[in-house]
Image (tube, rainbow, N blue to C red):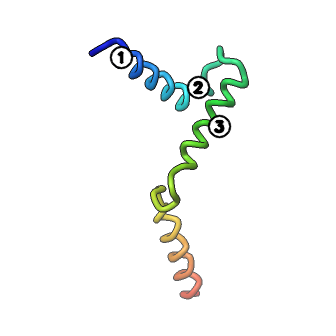
Amino acid sequence: MNPKKLLGILFLLLVAIFITSGDTYEFLPEPAREASVKSRKFIVGLWPDWLRRQDFDAEREKEIEQLEKQGK
């Protein structure tokens, strides 16, 4: 493995660590912590809605409530 490839992988690893948990590090200045949160929200916002996890339990709870209302 050549040094450029190793440095590239190390850089990507550091960026990933910063984005995922940079706001928890107290030694970073406030703008850097805010940048971490904004980056994370941006990356999460790139995923389409149909790929996000759906809450099937909420739908079932609504159906149960409707059935209970009909039974009364």
- The quarter of the picture where the C terminus appears is bottom right
Residue 36 placement, left or right of 5: right
Element assignment for label 2: helix
Residue at the extreme top: 3
Quarter residue 1 falls in:
top left
Residue 67 placement, left or right of 6: right
Residues at circles 2 and 3 in contact by the CB criterion of under 8 Å: no
Residue 11, given in percent of the width and then of the height, sits at 46, 20
Quarter residue 23 falls in:
top right
Q: Which residue is mark 3?
A: 38
Count all numbered tags in the image, as a single digit: 3
* Identity of the residue drawn at 67% across and 24% down: 32
Residue at the extreme right: 30
Q: Which residue is mark 1?
A: 6
Of badges 2 and 3, nearer the viewer stands 3
Residue 39, given in percent of the width and then of the height, sits at 60, 36
Residues at circles 1 and 2 in contact by the CB criterion of under 8 Å: no
Residue 51, given in percent of the width and then of the height, sits at 45, 57
Mark 3 is on which residue type? Lys
Of badges 3 and 1, nearer the viewer stands 1
Residue 48 placement, left or right of 1: right
Q: Which residue is mark 2?
A: 22
Mark 2 is on which residue type? Gly
